[in-house]
Amino acid sequence: MPLDLPALQPLDKHNQLLASNVHPEDWQNPIPKGRYHLVVIGAGTAGLVTAAGAASLGAKVALVERELMGGDCLNVGCVPSKGLLSASRAANAVRNAANVSVKVNGGCHVDFADVMQRMRRLRAGISHHDSAKRFRGLGVDVFLGQGTFLDSSTVQVADRKLSFKKAVIATGARAAKLAIPGWDEVNPLTNETLFSLTELPKKLVVVGGGPIGCEMAQAFARFGSEVHLLEASAHLLSREDQEAALIVQESLRRDGVQVHLEASVKRFEAANVRKYVHFDAKHGPDSSLEANQILVAIGRQPNLEGLGLEVVGVSFDNRSGIQVNDRLQTTNPKIFAAGDVASQYKFTHAADFMARSVIQNALFIGRAKASSLLIPRATYTSPELAQVGLTELQAEELGVASDTFVQQFSSVDRAILDGQTEGFVKVVVKRRTDKILGATVVSEHAGDLIGHLCFAMTHRMGLKKLGSTIHPYPTQAEAIRKLGDQYNCTRLTPTVSKLMKTWLNWTR
């Protein structure tokens, strides 16, 4: 194997196929042919989109990756996690089949090893899209190894020196560590090692109640683990609309996750084959939890090591990443940055669209602004929670006068028929207008439904037009149309109503 990465364990045929695609052992770095229009360091989503898009426009592009092409999303993020979530939802559906009058004989048994093998098989099958060979076929020179700036026109990779006109840093981010005693003793899991498990932990402690922590806590509880989830804030998913986050929180508890809020982890401990998490609890005595495995999901930190940023005058911070302006240009005007290494929005779709802006700005006289991107986010628990734009609280904190419209799924026919009445669509609009400032959806299909509202906001469509959009009946998307109806009803003021009655009486 070319790399000793936890993501490639176990070394079965599926992971071997993955490696052959995204970091082939026999890969020979090409001989550079003159100056490149773009040298892209990092082959995660931002780097891949930048390289492929620039090459398709005729640019001469070099793409550098020191680990696995595809980055976190393919290897240790979106793809493997959603593979596990699909299996956990199936297990939950079997267990709750009686709720829709379906009897399942024999109960539900989860073959965890097979669940993980399925995930590895599907991940390997997807990996050819991000493969070194595919990008070579697109006309991109692919270099495997650490890329380091020598000066403002040269990057070195192993024994190759790449001359460039412009460069793009897209090295992504990695799981943040807790600076507490005992980390090395217990060697906790992160998203970079979690997907190498082949045995279901009997007891799992998850530290961090953000999207990754919540998704994996619920999934492993549904697989059969005893799961404890520790969160420092007063509720899970603390960045999200509180009302929506509480629905997700209660759903996790129903699935058996034991949630500990306002809990501060003090140290880890290993004793014989056992692992312990010691924490302070605000609303109870200090406590300790025993675990077979500990998963830490407390955020991300940018990958900056080995790049030689000081040499080329690129300003950065070890926590927030590379400093960029609104055109995604670093403090060195020849070097741009995109994706997790330079953004607070650490999402695959954000990296994708930042990369599109970089292509415009680096290759042409572009004026694409990162601030113009409307970036939604979704947490894929059951129910899902999706958010775009401002919440009610954020609008209030910014001093923006707003109105809020809410449609409960308990009043949407398709949700009733599906047995998925928990949740709502909430839209925040500018006061006395239908201009959408933000939206929250909490439902089984929130990640899909938020796209309707993103489209409306991107194209400056208000609730009035959403109310006039015809949806097939019955669908859960009707909840959005019903919000339009709610807004239209507010326009029927007593004065307007009186005028209408007068008109109808006169024309009778």
Image (cartoon, rainbow, N blue to C red):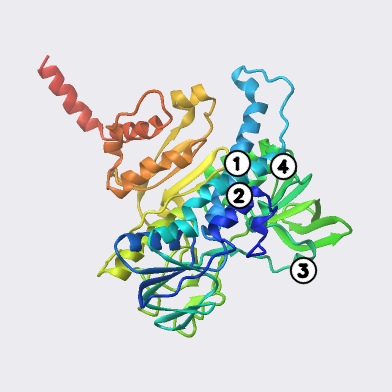
Seen at 66% across and 18% down, the residue is 103
Name the residue furthest left: 507
| Crowd around label 1: few <14 · some 14–19 · many ≥20 (10 Å) | many
Mark nearest the camera among 1 and 3 is 1
Q: Earlier in the sequence, mark 1 or mark 3?
A: 1
Residue 2, quarter of the rendered image? bottom right
Seen at 76% across and 52% down, the residue is 293
| Crowd around label 2: few <14 · some 14–19 · many ≥20 (10 Å) | many
| Crowd around label 4: few <14 · some 14–19 · many ≥20 (10 Å) | few
Mark nearest the camera among 2 and 4 is 4
Q: Label 4, label 3: how many angstroms apart (C-alpha)?
A: 32 Å
Q: Nearer the viewer, residue 15 or 422?
A: 15
Are the residues tagged 2 and 4 within 8 Å (C-beta)?
A: no
Q: Earlier in the sequence, mark 2 or mark 4?
A: 4
Q: Label 1, label 4: how many angstroms apart (C-alpha)?
A: 15 Å
Q: Position of residue 245 (x, y in %)?
A: 55, 45
Q: Which residue is mark 4?
A: 113
